[in-house]
Structures are given as structure tokens and as C-alpha cells.
Image (cartoon, coloured by chain):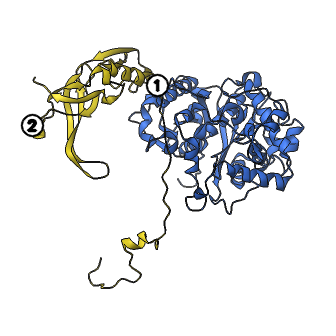
Amino acid sequence: MSVKIKHFPGEEIETKDFREGKVLFESFRPKARYAWSAGIAISRFLEELKNGRIIASTCSKCGRIMVPPRIYCEKCFKPTDGWTYVKDTGVINTFSVSYIASDASRLKEPIVVAVIELDGASPGMGIVHLLGEYGDWRQLKIGMRVQAVWKPPEERVGAITDIKYFKPVKE
Amino acid sequence: MKGEEKTLSEVAIVGVGCVGFRPVTPELSYKELMFEAAVKAYEDAGGINPREDIDVFVTCAEDYLEGFSIFDEFVPDQLGAALRPLFTVSGDGMLGLATAYMLIKTGQFDTVVVEAHSKASDILTYMDIVQFGLDPIFNRPLGGHPYYIAGLEMTRYLYETGTTEEQCAQVVVKNKRNAILNPYAAYGANITLDQVMRSEKLFHPLKKLEISVPADGCIVMVLASEKVAEKLTDKPVWVKGVGWCTETPSLETRDWTRAVYTRLAAEMAYKEAKITNPWRDIDFAEIHDLFAYKELQHMEALKLCDYGEAGKLLEEGLTGLDGELPVNPSGGLLGMGYGLEASGLQKVLEVVLQLRGEAGARQIDNAEVGLAHTWRGIPTATGAVAILSNVK
């Protein structure tokens, strides 16, 4: 804004004008609830998480082993034709340290999110998850080996959070 | 180019695939539903490979009905559209069809895929989502179920046109009976006029059985330019004209009798398709019947008859399967189930099947020109019309 203008025409409004109802607005909170059918591929994936295993689907045409699993190979546009377990170990593809929550409030402890390429899956495929037990995050490196830390079996419900996080492991 | 007028290509529907419609589909995710419909459509289009043979993909979805935002991003893999040109039309499938049609008309693209689906059973608070579409200042604070808007319109429509409640109820009897013959229909039934009339009045004068019930399903279509179409199929269905229109969103000032949005959309499509006398030039019509009275009101807006005449034509049996101009041979949305943003493609699907002579027990003899019409439902005043023919 120009520094030359000392007075702007119009009426100034302050927070108290909103509180006192001098500025009118309508607020509404939508009631929007959904329950998505997981379907064939994701149901199997979630079931296996409950068992403490990570499952992939495979395409015999391009030979890829795909996690998360799907019933179609998006590269070949063919139905996938097999299932196979992959390991719960892998390497960090990329990671980020997130200091704030979605409402911009500061997190007490920053969370570290990582893309992990799982052993046994095709290159560039795996899981997005949290990292833990890493000490100082500055020690984290792309290409570092990590392993899943699972919740105890009785606490698993068939959700991505059945894995607590991935922790760095020795080569 | 000097002194040379470029002729625009004709556009044809060369492949259709449909899954559903069913009341619920808990066994499949929406992505899996779409994959199945896409596979069918590509097979139907002469076994094309979407990874190479399709120029553009158009998906039709409204984020609030999906439950997550930016729906485009969740679409490519299951359509064979990964790393290919794709976008979403946030509206009814017929608007996607119109978009595909225009893309091909530009001469820039030869093959375009259109997809629309309904996973209504995944939405736990469907009516609240519909309610969310109402004006937040003037209408939403009044509360109530948003379908009272249909009650308002039906009241005025009956008052102005002299159409009777029985005539509206008769639409349900006809459509649900047609749906018995349609394997894609979820709610076919043999019911009597008396059953409809005695069903609970939910939004006076609208009765429970006069309201279409949502259903799950997915439809994928392949459109192609003239030169490609004739290579892919020996049964192309030509898009002769499309039109669409939106009236005011204001409930306070809109026309409550005549579905003006449909009238103007129809005039746009008729002009292009050179239809001068709709009743004579069109062999059958698929018309949006989310509520029974809407079939009659829309027939009039589509100029298939004068205002107030549709109910009489129905009573005389002229819009029945064996009538002079069958309306909703598919069973309509009352019989098929309301496919949300897929409803426009539900209409187009039936027209395509009829024009290819593949409509089985509900096949209309010697059909050459069919009309597909859609409406975006409560609380909108948006409609679209497509004229299709098996003659180029």
C-alpha cells in the first residue's frame, strides 16, 4: 500500500465488531460421513497387516511386484494375476520432518514421514510411513535401511497404523 | 486456409461398458468398479488398448459425493490413463460426453474416453450432502429434508398444467416394469398404480415410490472421430447434437413449472441435430426421472408435447415400450436406480444399446434416432440433452 495515503476512506472494523454481531455472516458445519469399500486388493492388504505381513500383487506381463496391491496393473492395463509377500524392511527413498499440524499449531515432537521402498517389491514401490527410534533426525539419510515396528498382534485392526513406524537398522 | 472451409468430423460412440447398477457393492472399491467398466468398454470398442489408443480421458465426479477432494488424482490407474491427458468434469456424465464431443470436433483428438460412476453406498450422509448444496443464507437454515424442493415443484407443476397425481404415479408403474427387462437395473418391479398412490406421502404431493433410490454402478464410454470410429466398430452410434443449460440457482425466482433449463438445452441440441418436430423425428427417449413427475415435466420441456399433455400421452400408452414414442425403456432411474453423476450416461447407455439393437427383451423395433436427457437433481436447475442416431 502506498505510504503517501494517510487515511483510507470507509469504516474500519475490529474483532469486537464481529463479536457484537455488527458484521453478519452465516456459519455451517457440513455433515459429511463416508465409509469407502476397501475392495478386493486393499481388503487383502489390510487383512495381511493384521497378520503382521505386507502383501503385494503381481503382473505377469511386466513382472512388477506392486505395493500397495491393486487388481489392475496401471502400466499394462491388465488384471494382476498373483499375490506375493514382500519384506517389512526396505530403504528410505525420501523423507521430511514435519514441525506443525494441519491447523498450523506447533507439534511437541516433530514427526518424520518417509517413503520407503520395500525389499521384494519392484523398484520405487513400497509404503509411506512414519519413522521412529532414529535419534537425531539429522542422522537420517536417503538410502538408509529401515524395518517396520509392528503393534502387538492383539492391537492390530487391519489398518496402516498396525505398523507403528519404521526404524533404522544396521546394513 | 484461404477460401477453404474445414468440415468438422462427425463423432460416434464406439464402445460402452457398464457395471451395476446395484443397491450396494461392498465387494468392490470405486476404483475396482471403474476398472471393470473400463475393460468392458475397451473390449466393446474393438479391443482397443487404452495405453496407446486413447487421446484424452474425461471423468465426471463431484468431490462431495466421493468423499475426498480433487478426484481427478484418484482416477488414471484404473482407466488405463496413467501418465496420459486426463481431467475431471465436476458434473453429470452427459456434460463429460459433451466435452468429449467438443474435443473431437476440434480436430485435435480422435479418441476420448468418458467415465462416470456412483458409489452412493459409500456415502453415509447422502441427504446431508444434498442439503449442503442449498443456499447457506436463504434456504439451509430452514432445515428439513432437501427433497421438499421436489414437493414444491410438483405442486406448482400439477397446478399449472392440470396433470394429475395418478398420471405421475403411472410413470412409476411403467418404468419399474420396463426395468424388469433390463439386466443393468437395480429396482425393477411389477407394481400397481394403487400401490404407488398409497405409498407414504413424504413431500406432499410427492410419494415415496415416486422417488428414485440411489444405486452403485459405473459407465465408461469411448468416443471417436469418424475416420477412427468406422475402423473400430461396425455399429457406431453418432452424436448428432448436444446441448446443456443452467437456470438460476435461486429457489425464490426460478421457474417452478416448465424446467426451462431442459427446454433450452433441448433447443441447442435440436438445432445442431436438425430436429424440427421432436415427436416425429425422435423414435424413443431416455428422460431424467429422479421423481416420477419429472419425466412428464421434462417430456414437455423437451417439446415432445405441449405443456400439460405428457400425462395424457402416458395414460394412452403412447410412451410405453410398444407405444409410438417409448420413454425410458431402460426403466429410467426409478427402475435402474439413481446413479448420481452417472445418471446422464445411464440414459446414453440405453440409447446406444437400443440403436445397436442390443437391448434384449426391451428392444424397440426400427429405432434410428434416440434422445438422452439428464438433470443434475436437487437442488440444481441444470440439464443436458444428447441426440444420437445409428445413421450418420
Q: Is residue B72 left or right of residue B283?
A: left
Question: Subunit of mark 2?
Answer: A
Q: Tag on residue B81?
A: none
> Which chain appears blue?
B
In the rendered view of the protein, which quadrant contains the C terminus of chain A? top left
Among the two numbered marks 1 and 2 on one chain, the one whose residue lies closer to the N terminus? 1
Residue type at mark 2 is: Gln
Residue type at mark 1 is: Gly
Residue found at x 50% / y 62%: A26
Residue found at x 30% / y 16%: A85
- Could you say where residue B296 lies in the image, as x and y percent from the top left? 79, 45
Residue B153 in the image: above or below residue B172: below
Q: Nearer the viewer, residue B28 or A133?
A: A133
Task: Report helix, strand or loop for mark 2.
Answer: helix
Q: Nearer the viewer, residue B384 or A115?
A: A115
Q: Colour of chain A?
A: yellow
Q: State how far apart marks 1 and 2 are (Cα).
A: 39 Å
- Could you say where residue A156 lies in the image, as x and y percent from the top left? 32, 24
Residue found at x 45% / y 35%: B75
Q: Tag on residue A39?
A: 1
User: Disc 2 marks which residue?
Assistant: A139
Task: Report helix, strand or loop for mark 1.
Answer: helix
